[in-house]
Image (cartoon, helix red, strand yellow):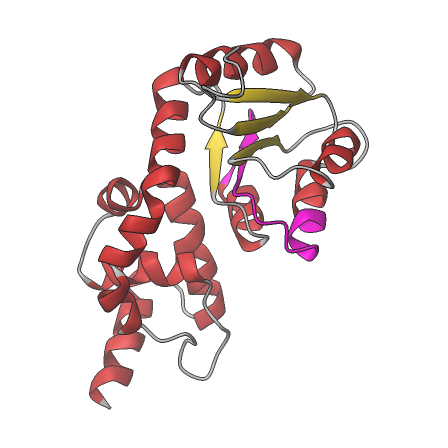
């Protein structure tokens, strides 16, 4: 493990599987991060009171409170660290639930070391990406017409959706997984009360042009 003077920052790994904790730790330590592991959410919350890591990898299925419950607790307290929710049995509803409750991404296991490194690097580049896309994002409404408020990440996805980008293209542009993009799309479709992404795009465009 690198010493503090050479560390690129702390990353918390929360998983009840020792082999997964070891695997993620090895990959992240190789990249120069100090990794602190937890086997349950209670231990994480105890440390989170005094420390703010660069990001958190949080497993959904944990002993005691679930990963989603822990995520809700962190967000209710406005805890600023980005959270990557992980699961070996993920599906779209689970991804939507994680994203809706403030996860930065939803990651299905098994996950490769390259993917983990890519996620962390994309996170580090996020401020510049956000600045580069700020003009486009301002053109997308905070609220769907007559409906619910969009999250910041939903607006980011919608910008590219309106340009005709596929899930894969949007994922590459925003440094997300395709499953996470699917989750954001599903959430926006639900909020808009429509049945498909195509209907969502037509709704936004019709409002823009007063049709």
Where residue 69 sits: x, y (%)?
72, 44
Q: Quadrant of the C terminus?
A: bottom left
Can residue 63 be seen here? The reply is yes
Taking depth in this image into account, of 10 and 133 the one nearest to the observer is 10
Where residue 144 sits: x, y (%)?
41, 76
Taking depth in this image into account, of 50 and 146 the one nearest to the observer is 50
Where residue 174 sits: x, y (%)?
30, 46
On screen, residue 193 above or below 25? below
Quadrant in which residue 20 is drawn: top right
Taking depth in this image into account, of 106 and 92 the one nearest to the observer is 106
Can residue 196 be seen here? The reply is no
Q: Which residue is at the far front? A: 5
On screen, residue 18 above or below 190? above
Q: Residue at x 18, y 61 (%)?
A: 163
On screen, residue 196 above or below 66? below
On screen, residue 106 above or below 138? above
Where residue 63 sits: x, y (%)?
78, 27
Q: Residue at x 23, y 48 (%)?
A: 166
* Residue 75: in magenta span: yes
Horizontal side, residue 43 vs residue 172: left or right: right
Horizontal side, residue 190 vs residue 182: left or right: right
* Residue 34: in magenta span: no
Q: Residue at x 43, y 18 (%)?
A: 32
Quadrant in which residue 15 is drawn: top right
Taking depth in this image into account, of 133 and 8 the one nearest to the observer is 8
Q: Residue at x 68, y 30 (%)?
A: 61
Q: Which residues are magenta?
A: 72-91
């Amino acid at each position: 493990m690198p010493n503090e003077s050479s560390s690129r920052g702390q990353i918390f790994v929360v998983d009840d599987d020792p082999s997964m904790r070891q695997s993620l730790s090895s990959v992240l330590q190789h990249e120069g991060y100090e990794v602190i592991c937890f086997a349950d959410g209670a231990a994480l919350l105890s440390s989170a009171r005094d420390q703010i890591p660069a990001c958190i990898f949080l497993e959904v299925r944990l002993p005691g409170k679930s990963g989603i419950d822990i995520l809700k607790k962190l967000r209710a307290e406005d805890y600023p660290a980005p959270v990557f929710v992980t699961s070996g049995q993920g599906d779209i509803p689970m991804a939507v639930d994680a994203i809706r409750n403030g996860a930065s991404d939803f990651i299905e296991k098994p996950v490769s070391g390259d993917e983990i490194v890519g996620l962390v690097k994309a996170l580090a580049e996020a401020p510049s990406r956000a600045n580069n896309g700020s003009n486009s994002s301002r053109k997308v409404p905070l609220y769907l017409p007559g409906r619910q408020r969009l999250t910041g990440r939903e607006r980011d996805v919608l910008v590219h959706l309106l340009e005709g980008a596929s899930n894969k293209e949007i994922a590459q542009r925003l440094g997300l997984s395709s499953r996470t993009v699917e989750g954001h799309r599903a959430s926006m479709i639900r909020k808009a009360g429509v049945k498909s992404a195509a209907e969502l795009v037509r709704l936004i465009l019709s409002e823009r042009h007063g049709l």
